[in-house]
Image (cartoon, helix red, strand yellow):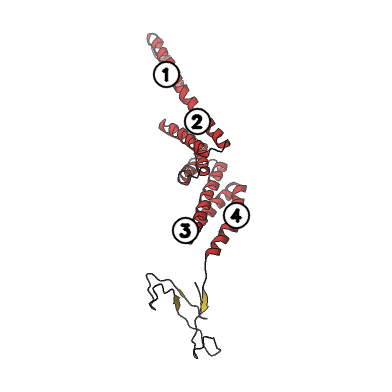
């Protein structure tokens, strides 16, 4: 709008009249776009209050797209709100994308970054639970570690109380669940001189290794069968 007003002052009087007629038609168009953008955000906030996260996520995405198409910088809060609404709607991939964009564009706002980090922690908290549900311990541990790192970063940044509580939940519930799903096998290897299966004082422990004979052929296959070494006392733990 300012551009049009300044431009009017630099054109000839004869052209100024025609240009003003044209600007009268153009300015409402720009004002309409601005109003629509504001309306998207207001409506998105209302949808979140009403528990309709999916619709809020759609509206925030529209607002972001409109700003990007207009080559205007996007308010980092928009990225954050888009991420939070997508997260609440269960759309975790898009939520993670918008939350990471929020982090990239909010380096001067620790509080905003802290909220984004805590939300990213929530995403990986959910992933941890999902992996545990299908007993994928390895991936659950990776997701658990990422969740902890995000929560811890938020806590260190501004003492985020939600992140602190989430860390306690993560350590107290998820870690215990992981441990409960892990089976351990321990034992001892020794020279059973008399063959009675009982350790005697004169029967020394042996150094060696124990392996999981998956194919039951009595032979160790290094490519597919896990192994553990015994210690000097012959003890081992799977």
Q: Distance of mark 2 from mark 1, alpha carbons?
A: 22 Å
Helix, strand or loop under label 1: helix
Q: What separation in Å lies between label 3 and label 2 (alpha carbons)?
A: 38 Å
Question: Label 2 to label 4, Cα distance in Å?
Answer: 36 Å
- The residue nearer to you, when weighing 105 against 88, is 88
**What label sits on residue 139 in the rendered view?**
3
Where's residue 143, x and y in %? 49, 55
User: In the rendered image, which residue does mark 2 sit on?
Assistant: 40
Query: Label 1: few (<14), some or many (≥20) within 10 Å?
Result: few
Secondary structure at badge 4 equals: helix
Residue 63, above or below 197: above
* Label 3 or label 2, whichever comes before in sequence order: 2
Q: Looking at the image, tell me whether mark 2 or mark 4 is earlier in sequence order.
A: 2
On the question of residue 93 being in view, the answer is: yes
Question: Which numbered circle lies on residue 169?
Answer: 4
Pointer 3 with pointer 2, Cβ within 8 A:
no
The earlier-in-sequence mark between 1 and 3 is: 1
Q: Nearer the viewer, residue 36 or 155?
A: 36
Residue at 46% x, 25% y is 33
At label 2, counting other C-alpha atoms closer than 10 Å, the crowd grade (few under 14, some 14-19, many 20 or more) is some
Asked if marks 4 and 1 touch (Cβ < 8 Å), the reply is no
Q: Which mark is residue 16?
A: none
The reply, left or right, for residue 152 in relation to residue 17 is: right
Foreground residue among 237 and 21: 237
First in sequence, mark 4 or 3: give its number: 3
Of labels 4 and 1, earlier in sequence is 1
Q: Residue at x 56, y 45 (%)?
A: 114
- Name the spot of residue 235 as percent of width and height, x first: 52, 78
User: What is the crowding at mark 3: few (fewer than 14 residues within 10 Å), some, or many (at least 20)?
Assistant: some
- Tally of numbered tags: 4
């Amino acid at each position: 709008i300012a551009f049009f007003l300044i431009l009017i002052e630099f054109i000839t009087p004869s052209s100024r009249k025609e240009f003003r007629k044209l600007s009268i038609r153009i300015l409402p168009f720009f004002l309409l776009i601005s109003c629509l953008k504001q309306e998207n955000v207001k409506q998105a906030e209302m949808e979140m209050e009403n528990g309709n996260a999916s619709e809020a996520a759609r509206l925030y995405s529209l607002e972001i797209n409109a700003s990007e198409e207009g080559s205007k910088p996007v308010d980092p809060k928009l990225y954050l709100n888009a991420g939070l609404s997508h997260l609440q709607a269960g759309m975790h991939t898009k939520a993670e994308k918008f939350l990471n964009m929020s982090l990239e564009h909010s380096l001067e706002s620790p509080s905003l970054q802290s909220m984004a980090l805590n939300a990213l922690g929530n995403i990986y908290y959910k992933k941890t639970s999902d992996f545990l549900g299908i007993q994928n311990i390895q991936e659950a541990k990776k997701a658990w570690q990422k969740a902890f790192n995000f929560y811890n970063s938020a806590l260190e940044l501004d003492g985020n109380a939600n992140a602190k509580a989430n860390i306690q939940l993560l350590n107290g519930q998820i870690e215990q669940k992981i441990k409960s799903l892990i089976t351990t096998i321990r034992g001892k290897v020794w020279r059973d001189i008399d063959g009675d299966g009982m350790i005697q004082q004169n029967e020394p422990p042996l150094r060696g290794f124990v392996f999981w004979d998956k194919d039951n052929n009595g032979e160790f296959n290094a490519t597919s069968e896990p192994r553990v070494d015994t210690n000097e006392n012959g003890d081992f733990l799977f």
